[in-house]
Image (cartoon, rainbow, N blue to C red):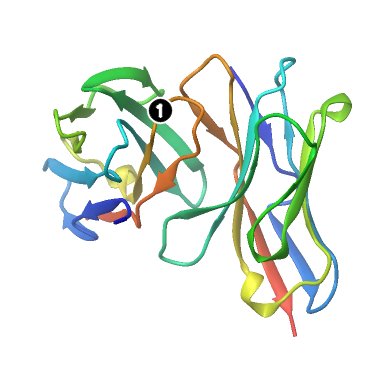
Amino acid sequence: KAGVTQTPRYLIKTRGQQVTLSCSPISGHRSVSWYQQTPGQGLQFLFEYFSETQRNKGNFPGRFSGRQFSNSRSEMNVSTLELGDSALYLCASALGALNEQFFGPGTRLTVL
Amino acid sequence: AQSVTQLGSHVSVSEGALVLLRCNYSSSVPPYLFWYVQYPNQGLQLLLKYTTGATLVKGINGFEAEFKKSETSFHLTKPSAHMSDAAEYFCAVSEVSGNQFYFGTGTSLTVIP
């Protein structure tokens, strides 16, 4: 069974630009969560989608948004990038609530 | 909201020595508990989990953890450290009634030859 895939793996953007990251969950998994990982803050929860609906949202500004498609694939978008948005963005999928999350390798975003 | 505390952001042990990584959570209701490991430039991999039943949980790579409700703890141990255990370890909690995971800030384990 294929694992969680994230594209692209690496991304370099400049301040003010926007970016879209993609996540394909494990087949059959309907829950997709996104996290931001930085050396100083650890893993910060962004949001979680289940069957195309956002069920939970972390404490991030509105510049961070996401969506989930009918095939459970998910995208997250960050608009008006700031230097502080440089991070590893991790996607995790699960069968549903309470099940363990399976993580993708992440997308390393660098904002210059 | 839950909070997860991992004592010690950096832990160093000698090869062959006991590994002990600490995790405490805040919930008064026993949650589901997880330990994940992250190797450089990779995503997180599940080591072990506790949901219900036996409080001593065995995971992969020789790791185990014990759920202690009275101490609200879920410490991770391994009797003998191996060089390949050097990585970042994250404790996570999922509330039984919720859909969200809460992660600790991580503990970086260094194994000294």
Question: As displayed, is residue A55 above or below residue B36?
Answer: above
Question: For this rendering, which residue is in front, A91 or B56?
Answer: B56
Residue occupying image coordinates x 72% and y 21%:
B30
Residue behind mark 1: A96
Task: Quadrant for the C terminus of chain B, please.
Answer: bottom right
Residue occupying image coordinates x 35% and y 57%:
A105
Question: For this rendering, which residue is in front, A82 or B7?
Answer: B7
Residue A48, position as x, y percentages in the image: 35, 27
Residue A110, position as x, y percentages in the image: 26, 56
Instruction: Report whether B66 appears left or right of B105.
Output: right
Q: Is residue A111 visible?
A: no
Instruction: Report whether A32 appears left or right of B62.
Output: left
Residue A85, position as x, y percentages in the image: 30, 43
Tell me which amino acid carries mark 1: Gly
Question: As displayed, is residue A54 above or below residue A43?
Answer: above
Q: Is residue A40 visible?
A: yes
Question: As displayed, is residue A110 above or below residue B15?
Answer: above
Q: Which residue of the protein is positioned furthest toward the bottom in this rendering?
A: B113
Question: As displayed, is residue A47 above or below residue A37?
Answer: above
Asked which quadrant contains residue B34, the reply is top right
Question: For this rendering, which residue is in front, A92 or A65?
Answer: A92
Q: Which residue of the protein is positioned furthest toward the right in this rendering?
A: B70
Task: Quadrant for the N terminus of chain B, please.
Answer: top right
Asked which quadrant contains residue A79, the reply is top left
Q: Secondary structure at mark 1?
A: loop
